[in-house]
Amino acid sequence: SSVSDQSKRDVYALGIILFEMWSAFATTMERITSIDRLRRLESFPQGFEAQQVKANRRNVCQLIRWLINAEPTTRPTALQVLDSELLPRTMLESELHQFLSNVQSKPYFHAMLMEALFEREDRAAALFYDPKNALSQYSGSDFALVLSNLTRIFLKHAAQ
C-alpha cells in the first residue's frame, strides 16, 4: 500500500467523521445504518441536506461527497481540501495568504520577514552558543540571571 493509497483512505475516513459530526443520531443503530447507507449508496439520511442548508452550511454535503467518493482516484488530497472553496476562510487565513503572496512577489517584504525572524539578538543564545562571547563580557545582572536559571534547572533535573 502506497502513501497515496493511505492518504486517500484517510480522506475517506475524514468524510465519514465530518458526517458524524454534523449529524444528530438518536440511537447507536441509527448512526450505524446512516453511515452504512452513506458508504454503500453515497446517500445522506432524509433531512440531512435540508438541515445543513438551514444551518447555513451549504457546502457540507458537497464536501462529504467529495471526500467519500467511491473511486479513490477522484478523492481530493488534504491540500486540495484546504485550498477548496468548500471550506470557509477565516480572516487570519486570508491575511496570512495575502502576506505570503506579498512575500513571494515583493522583495522588500521578503527582506522585512527575514530581518524580523533572524536579525534579533538573543542574549541567552549569545551567552551559550557564540564562542566569541565569554560570560565575563556581560553585565553582572546577565550573568546572575543565567547562573540562577542554570542552578534551578540543574537542581530540578540532575541533582537529587
Image: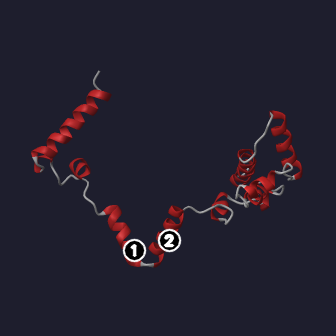
The residue at which mark 1 appears reads as: 109
Would you say the residues marked 2 and 1 are in contact, meaning their CB atoms lie under 8 Å apart? Answer: no
Q: Nearer the viewer, residue 131 or 48?
A: 48
Q: Is residue 20 above or below residue 72?
A: above
The local secondary structure at tag 1 comes to helix
Residue 155, given in percent of the width and then of the height, sits at: 26, 27
Amino acid type at mark 1:
Phe
What amino acid is found at the position of numbered circle 2 in the picture? Gln
Q: Secondary structure at mark 2?
A: helix
Relative to 160, residue 2 above or below? below
Q: To which quarter of the image does residue 52 belong? A: bottom right
Q: How dense is the environment of label 1, judged by Cα within 10 Å: few (below 14), some, or many (20 and up)? A: some
Q: Which residue is mark 2?
A: 98
Q: Quadrant of residue 59?
A: bottom right
Quadrant occupied by the C terminus:
top left
Specify whether 133 is left or right of 105: left
Outermost right residue: 41
Q: Which residue is drawn at the image coordinates 75% and 58% (left, top)?
A: 53
